[in-house]
Image (tube, helix red, strand yellow):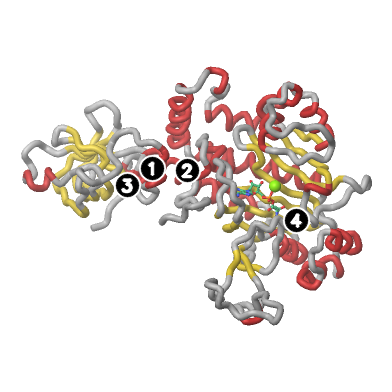
Amino acid sequence: MKHTKIIDLLSGNLLLQEVTAKGWVRTFRNNQFIALNDGSTLQNIQCVLELDAFPEETIKRVTTGAAIMVQGVLVESQGKGQKYEIQVFNLEILGDSDPEKYPIQPKKHSLEFLRENAHLRIRTNMFGAIMRIRSTLAYAVHKYFQDNGFFYVNTPIITGSDAEGAGEMFQVTSLPIDGSAPRNEDGSINYKEDFFGKPTNLTVSGQLEGETYAMGLGSIYTFGPTFRAENSNTSRHLAEFWMIEPEIAFLDLDGNMDLAEDFIKFVIKYTLEKCEDDLKLLEQRLLDEEKSKPQAERSEMSLIDKLRFVLDNNFKRVSYTEAIDILKNSKPNKNKKFQYLIDEWGADLQSEHERYLVEKHFKCPVILFDYPAKIKAFYMRLNKDEKTVRAMDILFPGIGEIVGGSQREERYDVLVEKMKALNIPEEEMWWYLDTRRFGSCVHSGFGLGFERLVLFVTGMTNIRDVIPFPRYPQNAEF
Ligand code: 4AD
Ligand code: MG
């Protein structure tokens, strides 16, 4: 039986026509009013049963969570709360849902409980809204780049390189891990016998491979899963997350900052236009959540105002050196309120510092640039001062770092020297160095953590709630 999506029924185009709807029962009132949802929109459609028109056996099976089909006439609703409803003449139970056992009852569940039921939480208003927004944002990402002459590149997920030099990688092997793996004479594992003939890991970033493609296609972007085995049990870190990494030939750091800002504004604007209902629901969720917080900790702006604020204001561009001065002289630093006190130039910024700059000092998104070379990856372009590199991080209120990027070191000699100093084996990076040997040029790019973007746009507070099945330390359920 062909059915119409609820979002289309609610447009009213089929008024007074016979329609079929399929979905899951949210609530059933007075043995008469079914609130039916099919995921196509936040809104339910009200399905009205005439009393005694259906066998009691069927009525009993209309329970929260059950999948049903209704056929009826789409009419203007007499009742409050909805514009249209279906006057049902045929009702079929497609899949029962035992009300004694179905975990998602029509009441408020905690986010923790819903995380444990991540396979069912998508049937709640909140998660429907979050995941529709996530999908819209993903579409906007592709739209932005495709409309601006970028090519979508799929970089490998299994790789032999550690792009970020962070060493926090998940190893990939087909060798036994119970100690019986083949050994070299010196006792080390003989990776020649492994599947790829060398040690490999899940990618932490597609950047290095992306760079090689930018050197042929001009402007590229990746949008794929990345993996980090960092033991960060925080509300901002996942072990498996999606990253968007554009890479552009003949672009310097200023152009890179312009691009990142324009891109972020586009995807937020697009989502504001397309997801009004869902955003309103999440705005209300945030208000309710904040009611339980002390006044000082509540946000000054509502969710939608916060999104508009990002669109309407320039991101503040500040050098690392200026930022350190601000932090050194800040109240929490002087009163020793920071967990990590800032006492000298060169200190790595922790999320408490980033959030101070964004939320307390500048009160707007901030782009920090020209970081000390020592705290950044090997591939970033060294400045004339030989102390700093052309790095940039974008910091967002409530999130901290949302983007990390840089102008890349395009000078072969400088790059090789840097790799030597950091013990990065040249033989393994021969292909990367080739881009600097043959037709090297100024180029730049950045990585945006997709879940951090979804976190910001949805106003959720834990990154585990904006990806369908989160992976984090001690958890790989589902
Ligand atoms: O700053 P990162 O480590 O930069 C890179 O990977 C570069 N290769 C990007 C590039 O220049 N092409 O990571 C980029 C972004 C961070 O700003 C953050 O938003 C996100 O990825 N990110 C994470 N998101 C969720 N969970 C984690 N564990 C994350 N680690 C980084
Ligand atoms: Mg970073």
Label 3, on which residue?
38
Viewer-proximal residue, 411 or 477? 477
Contact between marks 1 and 2 (CB within 8 A): the answer is yes
The amino acid beneath tag 3 is: Asp
Cα separation, mark 4 vs mark 3, equals: 41 Å
Viewer-proximal residue, 103 or 78? 103
Q: Position of residue 258 (x, y in %)?
A: 75, 42
Cα separation, mark 1 vs mark 4, equals: 41 Å
| Picture residue at 82% right of the left edge, 36% below the top | 319
- Dot label at residue 465: 2
The amino acid beneath tag 2 is: Asp
Q: For this view, does 43 lie left or right of residue 351? A: left
Q: Find residue 198 and report its image quarter.
A: bottom right
| Picture residue at 64% right of the left edge, 63% below the top | 153
Dot 1 or dot 2: first in sequence order is: 1
CB of mark 3 near ligand 1 (< 8 Å): no
| Picture residue at 34% right of the left edge, 48% below the top | 120
Viewer-proximal residue, 334 or 264? 334
The amino acid beneath tag 1 is: Leu
Label 1, on which residue?
114
Q: Is residue 73 visible to the viewer in this orientation of the structure?
A: yes
